[in-house]
Image (cartoon, rainbow, N blue to C red):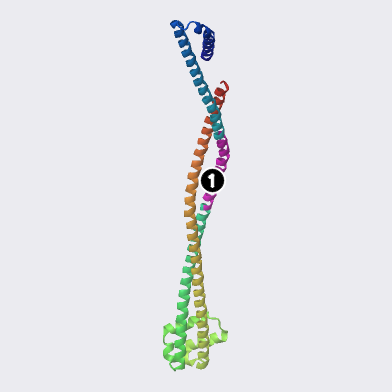
């Protein structure tokens, strides 16, 4: 309405000035008319200036409608493109976290199994070592007893040797336990019980004793070698399991750190998803309002 009134006033002032041009030539000396003309000229100038200002304002508003709409559409497009990316990243982070938790559980189980294996192997090794120690000690004692018996018989001290209840008792035990022919066992038993009155020659007895001693020395060498091999195997097992424990422990520490980082990443992605959704909704609301407002101008 204001703009229309200004246009009407501008038209009237123009018409009046045009009609008054001839009249002014005839009556230049009429001051009241000049004042009216000056007033109308001033009004025309003001209306023209206000019209130009309004035009400028209108053009600025339309420019804002254009650029503002474009900016909002770009922002909406970016947000709509970002949302699937966030969803994908969030799913990947959740899958990674789940896998890390599973891996950590398996590593811990491996550590527990390795320690359990070492504990069982240690218990068995201790048991085997104790058995070896006893068998080795007994074998060495028997070998020593056989050596004394052989030396005594060969040195002609059979009587004094047979008076030693400890040595004789050890030989009697060996005679019953060792694998030998019945004839040899009978001759040796008779010698230990009857001494020099035995029917068996001393050289035969010495031969039997030497064979027994050689057999026991061979047995001692075999069980000693077996013990050394058992120790070697045990040490290798313990070393391998220690390496396994160390490796799994390092993996646990590394993956626990990554698990924490994945948890933080999930929180950040959820916040980003929420912020993006809110921004998108606000931009769409502003765009609708802007398009409606600009459409009425």
Residue drawn at x 41%, y 90% is 160
Residue drawn at x 47%, y 60% is 246
Location of residue 85 by image quarter: top right
| Residue 135 seen in the current view | yes
For the C terminus, the quadrant is: top right
Residue drawn at x 48%, y 80% is 173
> Residue 260, image x and y in percent?
47, 48
| Residue 201 seen in the current view | no
The front one of 55 and 72 is 55
> Residue 39, image x and y in percent?
45, 10
According to the image, label 1 marks what residue?
A: 93
Indicate yes or no whether the magenta region holds residue 261: no
Location of residue 78 by image quarter: top right
Q: Which residues are magenta?
A: 76-103
Residues packed near mark 1 inside 10 Å, few (<14), some (14 to 19) or many (20 plus): many
Residue drawn at x 45%, y 90% is 151
> Residue 37, image x and y in percent?
47, 9
């Amino acid at each position: 309405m204001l703009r229309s009134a200004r246009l009407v006033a501008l038209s009237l002032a123009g018409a009046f000035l045009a009609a008054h041009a001839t009249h002014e030539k005839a009556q230049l000396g009429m001051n009241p008319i000049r004042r009216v003309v000056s007033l109308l000229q001033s009004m025309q100038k003001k209306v023209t200036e206000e019209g130009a200002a309004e035009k400028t304002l209108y053009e600025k508003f339309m420019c804002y409608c254009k650029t503002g709409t474009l900016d909002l559409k770009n922002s909406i497009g970016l947000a709509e493109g970002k949302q699937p990316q966030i969803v994908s990243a969030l799913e990947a982070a959740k899958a990674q976290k789940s896998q890390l938790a599973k891996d950590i559980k398996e590593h811990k189980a491996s550590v527990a199994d390795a320690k359990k294996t070492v504990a069982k192997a240690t218990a068995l090794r201790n048991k085997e070592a104790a058995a070896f120690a006893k068998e080795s000690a007994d074998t060495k004692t028997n070998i020593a007893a056989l050596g004394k018996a052989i030396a005594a018989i060969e040195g002609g001290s059979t009587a004094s040797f047979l008076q030693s209840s400890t040595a004789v008792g050890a030989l009697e035990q060996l005679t019953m336990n060792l694998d030998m022919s019945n004839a040899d066992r009978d001759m040796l038993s008779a010698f230990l019980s009857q001494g020099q009155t035995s029917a068996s020659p001393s050289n035969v007895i010495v031969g039997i004793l030497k064979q027994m001693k050689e057999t026991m020395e061979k047995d001692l060498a075999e069980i000693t070698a077996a013990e050394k091999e058992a120790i070697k195997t045990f040490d290798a097992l313990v070393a391998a399991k220690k390496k396994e424990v160390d490796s799994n422990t390092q993996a646990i520490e590394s993956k626990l750190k990554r698990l924490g980082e994945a948890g933080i990443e999930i929180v950040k992605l959820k916040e980003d998803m929420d912020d993006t959704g809110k921004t998108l909704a606000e931009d769409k609301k502003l765009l609708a309002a802007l398009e409606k407002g600009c459409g009425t101008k």
